[in-house]
């Protein structure tokens, strides 16, 4: 999955299908391992995408004069 073709919503749907499949269907151990690995890879990509988006968020706040200013979002 390269960056240009990455779609967050589609990836979430794919991950949900994998989880449902692992929970409900009787598959071989090999197939379950394959699905699990695929789910982990998708999950990692989703987490990276969320972390990247979080870094881009700016927080709007007011300074002492009541003027609105932007600040870079920082994790606490």
Image (tube, grey):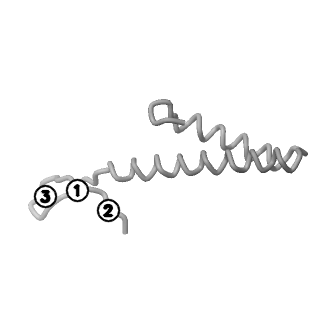
- Name the residue located 32 percent from the left edge and 48 percent from the top edge: 56
Residue 4 is situated, as x and y percent measured from the top left of the image, at 45, 31
The quarter of the image holding the N terminus is: top right
Disc number at residue 66?
3
- Name the residue located 47 percent from the left edge and 50 percent from the top edge: 48
| Comparing labels 3 and 2, the label whose residue is closer to the camera | 2
The Cα atoms of the two marked residues, 2 and 1, are separated by 9 Å
Relative to 29, is 52 on the left or the right? left
Relative to 5, is 73 on the left or the right? left
| Viewer-side residue, 58 vs 63 | 58
Q: Residue furthest bottom?
A: 76
Q: Are marks 2 and 1 in contact (CB under 8 Å)?
A: yes
Answer few, some or many: residues within 10 Å of disc 3's Cα (few below 14, many 20 plus, some between 14 and 19).
few
The Cα atoms of the two marked residues, 3 and 1, are separated by 15 Å
Question: Within the image, what quadrant is residue 73 found in?
Answer: bottom left
Disc number at residue 35?
none
> Which secondary structure lies at badge 3?
loop
Q: Residue furthest left?
A: 65
Disc number at residue 71?
1
The quarter of the image holding the C terminus is: bottom left
Q: Are marks 3 and 2 in contact (CB under 8 Å)?
A: no
């Amino acid at each position: 999955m390269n960056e240009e073709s990455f779609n967050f919503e589609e990836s979430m749907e794919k991950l949900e299908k994998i989880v449902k499949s692992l929970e409900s269907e009787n598959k071989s151990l090999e197939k379950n391992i394959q699905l699990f690995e695929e789910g982990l890879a998708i999950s990692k990509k989703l987490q990276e995408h969320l972390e990247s988006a979080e870094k881009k968020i700016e927080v709007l706040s007011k300074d002492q004069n009541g003027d609105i200013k932007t600040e870079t979002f920082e994790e606490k």
